[in-house]
Each structure stands twice: as structure tokens, then as C-alpha cells.
Image (cartoon, rainbow, N blue to C red):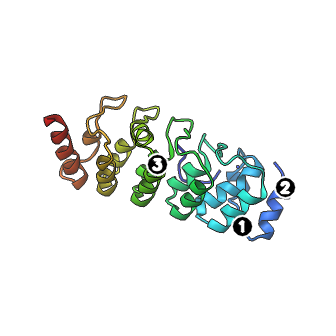
């Protein structure tokens, strides 16, 4: 999973096009590892500039699921930065809900790590298939964390409630033996919700 900072790479005509259109790029020093044709996507995803994102997708022959940085697709990044409108556009254009980054995380991991309830709901609703939703909720990253682990770690009670409503398990342990319950601080609303869900799950 990428972290929120600048990134970078080769085709200066492409960069010039976007400079003319008023798209701002991160400092070149921050983008040295990013191929030039992907920089407009990166900048648009980070800034949440919907027009710039549409322009980037329209003007370059880009696979929408091509990794931009750290294995993250532009959908991962738009989820990470919390840009709902960009996520909506990417899904309408067929971006893969289950694309994995280099850490094994899918876009839902990023949305949940940031506490973005509306984006998490949109991703789940866009699955249009019960089996696919289940698969997304059960996807683990390299540390064995499900999207619910990420939501619990951030104590995002609304996201926790959403994931549980769709069947996420509060009792699934990650690679360190930690369940989502154990990742939320005692006394928090997220912890209370997870404990109630766990009790209900164990009683069935």
C-alpha cells in the first residue's frame, strides 16, 4: 500500500500537454521512479482533480489497472486519498475492484485504512455479486490484514459497522494472531461494535 506522499518517470510531450491544461505535477524529485505517462494519473489521484483524471485517461493509451506506484493502481490511490468522485469515475470506466498492490492489498483496504465510509460502500456496491463481496472482505494483505483489520486499527466505527453488515469477520486473525477487535483501543466505539459482533458470531 502506498503512503501519502509524492511519487515519478519519460515522455515529455505528455507532460507538456498536461502543463498546458493546467495540471500541476508534484516536484520532479518526488516522481523520479514513476514513468512519465503515469504521472498525470498519479497527480490527479493524489489531488482529487476529476477533470485532470478524465483528461489523463482520455489522452493516453493507459491500461486503467496499470500499477502507478508500489503496485498501486489509480483506483488504489484515489481510495487512499479519499476522492469519492475519482473512485466513481474509475469504477464507471471498469477499474478492477480486486487489483492487488505489491503488499497484496485491494482498493477496499485503502478506503478502510483512511476511514472513507462512502468509498468503501461504493466499492462494495459495485461488486454486484455476493461471492465477489465476500472475496473482497476476506482478502488479506501481506500482514494477513483484511479490510476490517484496517478499519479497526483506525477505529473508524462507521466503516467497521459497514463491513460487519456485509459479513466481514471480527474474529479472523492476521499474521500476528491479532483479530480486528484487538486492534481497536479498549473503550472506543469501534471496539464496542466489534466485541458485540464477535459475541453474536460466536453464539451462532
Res. 9 visible in picture: no
- Which image quarter: residue 16? bottom right
Q: Residue furthest right?
A: 13
- Residue 103 image point, x, y percent: 52, 35
Relative to residue 56, is residue 10 depicted above or below?
Answer: above
- Mark 2, Cα crowd under 10 Å, few <14 / some 14-19 / many 20+, is few
- Residue 35 image point, x, y percent: 75, 46
Give the mark toward the camera: 3 or 2. 3
| Residue beneath the point at 44% across and 40% down | 136
For disc 3, the marked residue is 128
For disc 2, the marked residue is 12
- Mark 1, Cα crowd under 10 Å, few <14 / some 14-19 / many 20+, is many
- Check disc 1 and report its element: helix, strand or loop: loop
- Mark 3, Cα crowd under 10 Å, few <14 / some 14-19 / many 20+, is few
For disc 1, the marked residue is 23
Give the mark toward the camera: 3 or 1. 3
The C terminus: image quadrant: top left
| Residue beneath the point at 35% across and 51% down | 154
Amino acid at each position: 500500500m502506498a503512503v501519502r506522499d509524492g511519487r515519478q518517470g519519460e515522455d515529455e510531450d505528455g507532460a507538456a500537454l498536461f502543463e498546458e491544461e493546467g495540471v500541476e505535477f508534484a516536484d520532479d524529485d518526488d516522481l523520479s521512479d514513476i514513468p512519465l505517462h503515469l504521472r498525470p494519473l498519479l497527480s490527479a489521484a493524489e489531488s482529487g482533480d476529476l477533470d485532470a483524471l478524465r483528461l489523463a485517461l482520455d489522452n493516453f493509451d493507459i491500461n486503467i489497472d496499470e500499477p502507478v506506484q508500489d503496485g498501486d493502481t489509480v483506483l488504489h490511490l484515489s481510495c487512499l486519498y479519499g476522492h469519492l468522485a475519482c473512485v466513481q469515475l474509475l469504477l464507471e470506466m471498469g477499474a478492477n475492484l480486486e487489483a492487488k498492490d505489491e503488499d497484496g492489498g485491494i482498493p477496499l483496504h485503502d478506503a478502510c485504512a483512511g476511514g472513507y465510509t462512502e468509498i468503501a460502500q461504493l466499492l462494495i456496491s459495485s461488486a454486484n455479486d455476493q461471492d465477489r463481496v465476500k472475496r473482497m472482505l476476506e482478502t488479506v494483505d501481506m500482514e494477513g490484514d483484511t479490510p476490517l483489520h484496517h478499519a479497526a486499527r483506525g477505529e473508524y466505527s462507521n466503516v467497521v459497522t459497514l463491513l460487519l453488515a456485509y459479513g466481514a469477520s471480527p474474529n479472523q486473525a492476521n499474521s500476528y494472531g491479532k483479530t480486528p477487535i484487538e486492534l481497536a483501543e479498549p473503550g472506543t466505539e469501534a471496539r464496542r461494535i466489534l466485541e458485540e459482533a464477535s459475541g453474536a458470531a460466536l453464539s451462532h
